[in-house]
Amino acid sequence: MAVRKQDVARPGGLKRMSMADLADKHELYEESVQNVEDECKFVSDTFRQLRGREPVSFREDFCGTASASCEWVRRSPDNRAVGVDIDADVLDWGREHRLSRLNAEQQGRVTLCQGDVLEVETETVDALGAFNFSYWVFKDRGLLRRYFETACRAIKDDGILFLDAFGGYEAFEEMKEKTKYENFTYVWDQARYYPVTGEARCHIHFKFPDGSKLKKAFTYDWRLWTLPEIQEVLKEAGFRRVTVYWEGTDEDGEGDGVFTPETRGEADAGWIAYIVAEK
């Protein structure tokens, strides 16, 4: 009998591999967490509203699989993207599974750079995005300011930095939240939070219908920065205007995906916001 790809040798015979064994954590992450279409649309629409022109060049910091960079070049034949990440393995995954979906001309407008976002030098761009709260890896105020200063130098004179943030009183709890998808369950695990330092350790797990699990598929060691802190450090780093874009709600009180400028916000249990910093 031929051994099938989904089978694996075990003492006593062959055993079928579980759904967790066969899963690709990057595909699961993008299905459950990322929405690069909406992110790129927000960047493009907001830049146009603020600057009166179309943004052409985009840099994606902490780019991971570079999905946003690929989406950016798909949006217009004029668009160019630079993706920066320190992890060579995830960049290789992005080249194989994301850049490969672009045609040759589109691929030529994407540049991927392996390096530290604090050190790497690229062409100056119209817009720079650091999404999925990735910049929270900088837990010291001085280091966060250094990153924002680096980002400020990386954009053009009328460039804009785009960030996201989350908060609400549930953000400071040690808790798990489950979301069911068609073929898996996404688990957001806020495993540890330390009030004195603001440090947090979070995990993403995936569970499957066959009972198998992909535990700690991703782990994040962050500081939970608040919106006032982020805005203050951005201004210290040289950005002249910083605006928070707050998400609206639908008739059921759920987020509707529409973000507008807001100066106060609401004391929700959990919220997500964009931060737009103008040079």
Image (cartoon, rainbow, N blue to C red):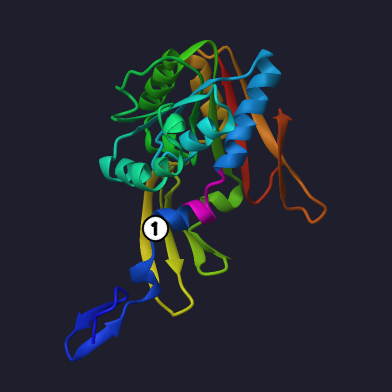
Residue 120: x, y in percent? 31, 22
Chain part drawn in magenta: 30-35
Q: Which residue is mark 1?
A: 25
**How far across and how far down the image is residue 59, in percent?**
45, 26
The answer to whether residue 167 is left or right of residue 108 is right
Amino acid bearing label 1: Lys
x 52%, y 28%: residue:
230
Residue found farthest to the right: 251
Q: Quadrant of residue 144?
A: top left
Badge 1 element: helix
Expressed as whole percent of the image width and height from the top left, the position of residue 175 reads 50, 61
Q: Is residue 34 magenta?
A: yes
272 or 196, nearer to the observer: 272
Residue sitting farthest toward the left: 11
The residue at the point 42 percent across, 63 percent down is: 205
**Is residue 124 depicted above or below 76 in this figure?**
above
Relative to 270, say whether 84 is above or below. above
**Left or right: 272 in relation to 201:** right
Q: Is residue 252 magenta?
A: no
Q: How many marks?
A: 1
Q: Residue at x 65, y 51 (%)?
A: 269
- Can residue 197 be seen here? The reply is no
User: Tag 1: Cα neighbours inside 10 Å, few (<14), some, or many (≥20)?
Assistant: some
Relative to residue 110, is residue 126 depicted above or below? above
